[in-house]
Image (tube, helix red, strand yellow):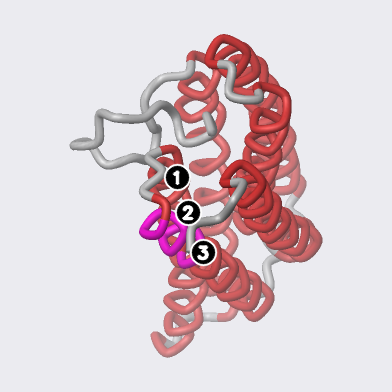
Amino acid sequence: MAPTNPCICKTNLLATTGTLALIAGFTQWLVGYRFSMAAGSDALHALSDGSADFVGVAIEKKAAGNPKKEEEWRAIGNKAISSLLILGAFIIGSEAYDRWNSGSYPVWLPAILAVGIFGLTIDLIRLRMLSKANRHSGNSNLEGLIVHARSDAWHSGIISTVAVLAMFAALLDLESGSYEFFIQLTDYVASLGLAGYMMFILSPRIWRGQKCAHGDPHDHHHDCDHKH
């Protein structure tokens, strides 16, 4: 039986997936700031996703089926999320740079692996919820969110994989100092790479409302993933 008010169903869905993304983001940030700036960079991505979902909730409530209002709210939401993403990426990049130059760059691999797996689990739950809702409703607006949730899962998976590979590097019988430097350098490069990607590639696309930054190159039917 079809729901009597699809708008409410979609609002509840976005609120749930947004809350999950925020939980993952805050957890990754709390652990990442102490033990891995790369995990902290991934946390910023998750927090922006959660914020984007709640922007979608606001659009559903404020636009009330009015295409003109919906477009106005989308533009405002995109610019707000883009600005926060740039600010966060700058803070993370600056912090990683300062730690590296100060000679104090703490990295603890078990913590990175734990938050990576936690983030991956949350992303897969979000992906399943959105995919299931899309199959039942056929709502094309959800397809962009599905692409984004899939991209988030890849990000978390990469963080976890880097941690696992770094742990296996211990089997190479490197000197203690060399192994520690290898881990720190890997985390440092990953954190700057993720921060740079969000600042110079993802944020401008969100600001301009371009096609999905993470999306399928064959997908021409919806705007940026953050535009709900």
Q: Secondary structure at mark 1?
A: helix
Q: Secondary structure at mark 2?
A: helix
Mark 3: secondary structure = helix
User: Which residue matches tag 3?
Assistant: 129
User: In the image, is residue 202 above or below residue 149?
Assistant: above
Instruction: Please give the label number shown on residue 149.
Output: 2
Which secondary structure type mostly characterizes the magenta part of the structure? helix
Kind of residue sitting beneath label 1: Leu
Is 197 in the magenta? no
| Residue that lies at the very extreme toward the left in this rendered image | 218
Q: Residue at x 55, y 15 (%)?
A: 71
Q: Which picture quadrant has residue 101?
A: top right
Residue 25: horizontal and vertical position, in percent?
70, 55
Question: Residue drawn at (76%, 65%), measured in percent from left and top?
Answer: 31
Label 1: which residue?
Answer: 142
Badge 1: few (under 14), some or many (20 or more) residues near its Cα, within 10 Å?
A: many
> What residue is shown at x 62% (from left), y 76% (from top)?
109
**Region in magenta:** 128-136
Asked if residue 33 lies left or right of residue 49, the reply is right
**Left-right relation of 220 to 190:** left
Taking 24 as reference, is 138 above or below it?
above
Q: Is residue 130 magenta?
A: yes
Q: Quadrant of residue 66?
A: top right
